[in-house]
């Protein structure tokens, strides 16, 4: 708290720079060919940290009561759990079996 009794607001540009840095790290992780599971875990972790920064400072949840934090955190955790629960299905090569590739389109107007 500030000395005059008002809550001190976060320095929004500092949060912006943190978000920018995390985004750059995300892009740096997304470009090379890593293991899909490792890449997914890293990207979800970085996205979660960015979401927490935005929620805490730009949505002002840092200054709210604990009840509101529980209301926000519960669906967030469920979402993360769902992503990791579906990861084996999404990364499985077997899911592509039985899917036919589309036929090539033959251009008949050239005759």
Image (cartoon, rainbow, N blue to C red):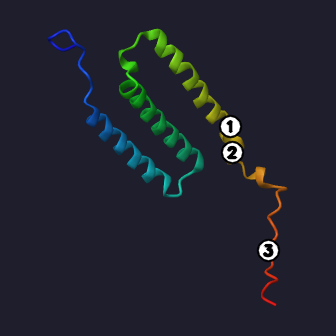
Viewer-nearest residue: 10 or 18: 10
Q: CA distance from mark 3 to mark 2?
A: 29 Å
Give x and y (percent) for residue 108. Answer: 82, 83
Q: From the viewer's perspective, is 32 left or right of 109?
A: left
Give x and y (percent) for residue 81. Answer: 61, 29
Residue tagged by mark 2? 90
Viewer-nearest residue: 26 or 10: 10
Q: Quadrant of residue 107?
A: bottom right
| Mark before the other along the chain sequence, 3 or 2 | 2
Mark 2 secondary-structure assignment: helix
Give the mark toward the camera: 3 or 2: 3
Residue tagged by mark 1? 86
How packed is label 3: few (under 14 Cα within 10 Å), some, or many (20 or more)?
A: few
Is 9 drawn above or below residue 80 in the view shown?
above
Count of marks overlaid on the render: 3
Give the mark toward the camera: 1 or 3: 3
Is 26 drawn above or below residue 9 in the view shown?
below
Residue tagged by mark 3? 105
Q: From the viewer's perspective, is 100 left or right of 64?
A: right
């Amino acid at each position: 708290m500030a000395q005059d009794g008002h809550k001190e607001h976060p320095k929004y540009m500092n949060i912006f720079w943190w978000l920018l840095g995390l985004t750059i790290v995300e892009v740096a992780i997304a470009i090379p060919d890593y293991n899909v599971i490792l890449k997914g875990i890293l990207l979800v972790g970085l996205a979660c940290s960015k979401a927490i920064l935005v929620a805490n400072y730009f949505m002002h949840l840092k200054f709210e009561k604990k009840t509101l934090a529980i209301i926000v955190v519960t669906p967030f955790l469920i979402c993360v759990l769902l992503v990791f629960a579906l990861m084996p299905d999404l990364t499985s090569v077997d899911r592509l079996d039985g899917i036919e590739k589309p036929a090539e389109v033959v251009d008949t107007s050239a005759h």
